[in-house]
Amino acid sequence: MRFLALIAACISTNLMANPLVGTWEFVKGEYATPEGRVHAASPHVTSTKIINKTHFSYITSSDNKFHYAGGGTYIVKDNYFIETVTLGNVESLIGRKMAFTFEVKDSLWHHKLVEDGKFIEYEVWKRVE
């Protein structure tokens, strides 16, 4: 019985250490463009992001047509999700390292990317149960 309690405690600690491991569905986003900020939301834009202990991947469609896919490695440090894109169909992202601030509240993952003091994007994702 103690052994099972120890295993449960280890699993629980691991999930608390990285609350992002799992499958996520896109809810909404805001993005900086040269013309200003644009917004996107489900169901017009759909995306699924899968995160394991070391890697992430995503696939996105707009109006039921393929739009983006990519993935790579990541680390979680403090309140940062730092991803390095290693593959995908957007060449400008390949090799890029991006440090998003993040927070998980009530099965929603909020993340924001600011680079050199400039807003880049803000997204909300919902955990798939």
Image: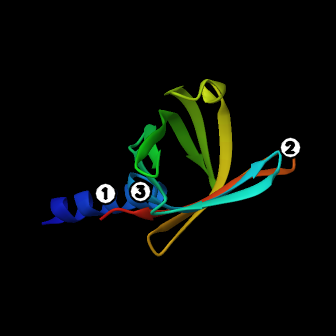
- Position of residue 36 relative to residue 104, above or below, is above
Could you give the CA–CA distance between mark 2 and mark 3, rounded to whole angstroms?
A: 28 Å
Could you give the CA–CA distance between mark 1 and mark 3, rounded to whole angstroms?
A: 20 Å
Give the residue type at disc 1.
Answer: Ile
- Which residue was labeled with disc 1? 11
Q: Residue 43's quadrant in the figure?
A: bottom left
Q: How is the image coloured?
A: rainbow
Q: Residue at x 22, y 65 (%)?
A: 5
- Which residue was labeled with disc 3? 24
- Position of residue 16 relative to residue 56, above or below, is below
Few, some or many residues within 10 Å of mark 3 (<14, 14–19, 20+): many
Give the residue type at disc 3.
Answer: Trp
Q: Is residue 4 left or right of residue 33?
A: left
Q: Position of residue 95 (x, y in %)?
A: 62, 24
Q: In terms of sequence position, does the residue under pointer 1 or pointer 3 come before the other? A: 1
Q: In terms of sequence position, does the residue under pointer 2 or pointer 3 come before the other? A: 3
